[in-house]
Amino acid sequence: MLKGKIFGYILISTLALTACKTTTTAAHPKADIKQIVNSSDVTLVDVRIPEQYEAGTAKGAINIPLAEIQNNIGSLKGKKVVVFCNKGIQADQAMEILTKNGVEAYDGTSWKNVKAIQDETTSGK
C-alpha cells in the first residue's frame, strides 16, 4: 500500500512539473530577440511611465504604460511586439497580459538592452 502511495506522489509530481514546463514554453515564444528587434515589421513598446519614456528609450519605440496595456490590446493584435521597461519586471507583466490576449509578444527586458541591440546592428556588428 505504501509503495502505491509513493508511486502516486511521484507520478503526480512528474505530471505537474512537465505541465508547468509546457505552459511556460508556450507562453514565451523562443526566438532570437536580436532578430526580432531588428525586423522591419516589429512594434517596440516601452511600458514605462511617460516621464521615463521621455528621458530615453529605444529608437522607434512607442510608449504604452503597463497600466494601459490591457486597453491597447486591439491596436497590438496581429503585430509582432517587443515589450521592455527599466529592468524587465514590468515587461514580464506586459508579456503575460499580451500573450493571454493572443498578441505575438517578445520580452526585450530593458530599454537599454533593446537600444544596445539596435546600436550593435547599425554599427556593422
Image: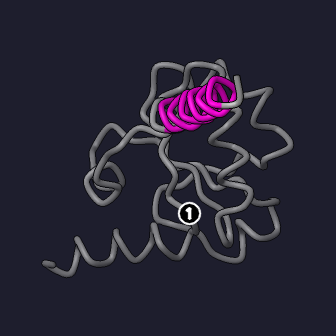
Magenta segment, which residues? 3-24
Q: Nearer the viewer, residue 98 or 28?
A: 28
Q: For the residue marked with disc 1, what is the amino acid?
A: Thr
Task: Please give the name of the residue rendered at 50% of the width and 58% of the height, measured from the top-left corner.
Answer: 108
Disc 1 on helix, strand or loop?
strand
Q: Residue furthest right?
A: 67
Q: Is residue 62 rendered to the left or right of residue 43? A: right
Relative to 46, say whether 70 is above or below.
above
Task: Write down the quadrant of residue 64 in the picture.
Answer: top right
Q: Is residue 88 rendered to the left or right of residue 114? A: right
Q: Nearer the viewer, residue 23 or 34?
A: 23
Numbered circles on residues, count: 1
Q: Nearer the viewer, residue 27 or 39?
A: 27
Q: Quadrant of the N terminus?
A: top right
Let me know if residue 31 is in the magenta part.
Answer: no
Residue 17 locus on image (x, y percent) = 57, 38
Relative to 1, say whether 80 is above or below.
below
Residue 96 locus on image (x, y percent) = 67, 37
Task: Please give the name of the residue rendered at 47% of the width and 42% of the height, measured from the top-left corner.
Answer: 43
| Residue corresponding to mark 1 | 109
Dot 1, how many residues are within 10 Å of its Cα: few (below 14), some (14-19), or many (20+)? many
Chief secondary structure of the magenta portion: helix
Q: Is residue 17 rendered to the left or right of residue 81? A: right
Residue 109 locus on image (x, y percent) = 56, 63
Q: Residue furthest left?
A: 124
Residue 112 locus on image (x, y percent) = 53, 76
Task: Write down the quadrant of residue 117 in the picture.
Answer: bottom left
Task: Please give the name of the residue rendered at 74% of the width and 56% of the height, measured from the top-left corner.
Answer: 90
Q: Quadrant of the C terminus?
A: bottom left
